[in-house]
Every structure is written in structure tokens, then in C-alpha cells.
Image: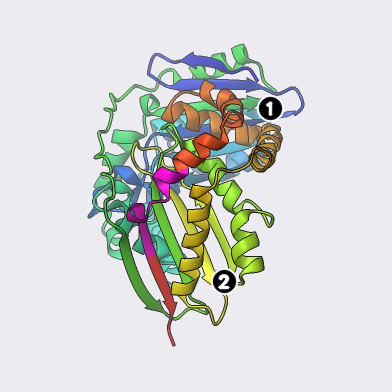
Amino acid sequence: MKIGRHVLANGLRLLHYYDASTRMVTVNLMYNVGSKDEHPDHTGFAHLFEHLMFGGSAHVPDYDSVVQNASGENNAWTMPDVTNYYLTLPANHLETALYVESDRMLALNINQESLDVQRQVVLEEFKQNTLNQPYGDVAMLMRPLVYGSHPYAWPTIGKQLSHIEQFSLEDVRDFYQRFYAPDNAVLAICGHVGFEECVAMVEKWFGDIPARGVKPRHLPTVPPQVQAQNLEVVRPVPLDALYKCWHAPSVSEPGYRECDLMTDLLAGGRSARLFQRLVKERLLFSGLDIYVGGEAETTAGSIQFTGKPVVGVTLEEAEQGLNEELARFVSEEVSAEELQKVKNKYESAYLFRNTNCQHVATQLCWYETVSCAENYLDDCELTLRVTPASIRETAEQVFRPENCSTLYYRRQP
């Protein structure tokens, strides 16, 4: 892979990857703003604003129609760290994509009708996924338990309905001016289009958008956890559930690759350790998973576990079995063969995903936001260098009882 790079005078960073195997092109625009940039008493706004970005702009009153008429498809998502917008369409319609994206970066149509409509959409999403969904409030319970006063302590949907209900047009204008600027964004173009052609088009459509002098944010660090955190709730759900979270290196810190491979060793498929020993052999869990978080902020990474005990097995018994297997994992260095197995899966997945221009465009923007895009090219090679010794060393640091937050989610009798 070869990455082309160009920086506009207004600070917008353009990344380019040419793929001759397709006649399509993906345009990915990532803004360096997410729920971590919200006030604790004013949450859920980054996600609501994502919805507002589809309400039209000065010269494009109906964004979706223009994209669809160009045979394209589009979507967006919000995380604690970033908000991402992407569209894929035939390469000969690239200029249409740049036109619509530049217009809403420069002149979003901010009006009360759009705010009222999208606010109601987000309120319904909050109710459906958080209030009326079994186990839907887990993030609401776990995040403050793990992160305390850090801005990761609430989910992107927000803490409560009242926060979303209170947003005003002035809030929208302020957020737009503060964060939706070329000097706070990364643009990736991947597909069947040359680098020089991309540079010319991007300069044409984005070059005149003024920079806004977006200042770097300085968020508080997450202090080391020195005592186990525990919470228990009772809810009308079909089964008990166990949730655990350990502080771990973030994506921008050494040790993240070890954490990624550790979770694959433990729960990366039906042959992984926890499935074999806790689900198949000991019959303690009906299902489980353990995975590494995608947090970008230094000191704020995580490894998270979720599992539902078999009917008749208590949460205490299931947790004891999990703790025993993790203690064994820490005390016994993984074999070279076992580690190579998950490395092979990782490498094949990495290579397969790189055949998808949409995936490559997203990854280039993400890596550029947290470090630099070129690091994505080195990621697989560096992961394949991880050793059994470094896996064990990282496991010893992460899987300490005092470093863990636990939620008992009990079924209401």
C-alpha cells in the first residue's frame, strides 16, 4: 500500500490510496470531536449533531438525494473520540461527493425544524436501545464505574433524555463553529482515482473554507485503579449477566497490540481458551466474550468481558471460574503455536479488510487522528512481532483484581 498525502492551507489533511481493482471510490471525512468533548451536564450532543449533518446545507438542501442520484450510499457514526462520515459511489462521481461534503462543512443549514426532527429521532433511539432493551443500560452503569470523572464516563447517546431535550439552536451553532472545521478534520479518498486528480478536486471544493483555529483539548488522565470496583443491579431480564472491565493500554500506547491478541487467545472463536473451558467443559457460561476497547486517550484504554451464566449457575460461581482461568492465563506463558494461530487469523483478516476501500479510508483517517496514517501500514507487521513473553507481561499488568470493575446484572425473580 502507498499513501498519498496533501495538507491544504486551511489545515485539512488529505490522504489518498489508489485501488485499480475497483471502479468505485470512498470518501471518508473524520472530525476530531466526539462525546469526550461534551460537558458532563450536557451529554449526547456529538451524536445528535451527527444526525443534524444530514439536514441539508446552503446549496444541497437534500444531502441523501444528491448522493443516491449519483449511485452512492452513505452513513455516519459517533464515538467518544471522533465523528465519522463516509460515502461510496462510482469514481466518476467523486466530485459530487466532495461538493456535498464541502458544502455542509462550510454552510450547514442550521434551523429549528431540523433540530426538532433529529432531536426526536435521537430521543426514540435512546428509548429503544437504552431504556426498553434488555441489558440496554449496561454502558450507563459501567462507564462511570470505570472512568469516574473522565469524559469517557458516559456513552455517546448521552446520560439521560433531559440532556437531549434541552439542546438549543445556539448550542448547535456553537458546536459547529468550534469543531466542524477543516483544521479539525481528516479526509481520505480511496479507490479508482489518481492522487493528483484528488488534490486538484479537494483544493477546488475545500480550499476556500476558512480555518477556525481549533485548539487542542487537554483532557484529564485516568488515574490508576488501586481498588476493585463493584456494582449490582436487578432488572427484568431473561438471564443473569456478568460484566467486567480492566484498565489497559489505549490504541495510542505500547501494549495495545498485546491486549488485542490476548483477547483473541481468550475468546477469539470456539477454540479459544474461555469458550473451551468455561462454556464447553465446565458449563459455567452459555455465552461469553472478551474484547479490547478502542479508546484513543492515553491511560484510558480497556479490556471488557461480558458473559451469561448457564441457568442454575450463580454469578458468583461463574465469576470464580472466570477468575481461575484468567489466573492460569497470567501464570502460564502461551505457547508459540497458540500465539501463532491467532496471529494467522489476525493477518488474514487484516489483508482481507484491505480489499475494501471503505475500510481502508476509515482506518487511514482514524490512524491519522490518533497518531499518523502511515502507522496503519506497519500495524500488522508490528502485531506479528508480539512474543509470548510480552503477552504474559501485559496480562500480569492488566488482569489484577484491584484493576477490575465488575457489574452483577441480576435477573429480577
Task: Please tell me which residue lies in front, 110 or 396.
Answer: 396
Task: Please tell me which residue lies in front, 10 or 256.
Answer: 256
The residue lying at 49 percent from left, 61 percent from top is 324
Left or right: residue 149 versus residue 315 is left
The residue lying at 71 percent from left, 32 percent from top is 355
The mark found on residue 170 in the picture is none
The mark found on residue 284 in the picture is 2
The correct choice, above or below, for 386 with respect to 228 in the image is: above
User: Is residue 79 among the parts visible in the rendering?
Assistant: no
As drawn, which residue projects farthest toward the front?
331
Residue holding disc 1: 91
- In x, y percent, where is residue 315? 46, 74
Report crowding for label 2: few under 14, some 14 to 19, many 20 or more residues within 10 A (C-alpha): many
The residue lying at 35 percent from left, 43 percent from top is 300
Kind of residue sitting beneath label 2: Leu
The correct choice, above or below, for 86 with respect to 245 in the image is: above
On-image quarter of the C terminus = bottom left
Kind of residue sitting beneath label 1: Ala
Q: Which residues are magenta?
A: 395-406
User: Is residue 115 among the parts visible in the rendering?
Assistant: yes
Task: Please tell me which residue lies in front, 399 or 164.
Answer: 399
Q: Secondary structure at mark 2?
A: loop
As drawn, which residue projects farthest toward the right?
21
Q: Is residue 402 found inside the magenta-colored segment of the image?
A: yes
Q: Is residue 247 found inside the magenta-colored segment of the image?
A: no
Q: Secondary structure at mark 1?
A: helix
- In x, y percent, where is residue 326? 50, 55
Left or right: residue 299 versus residue 351 is left
Corner quadrant of residue 360:
top right
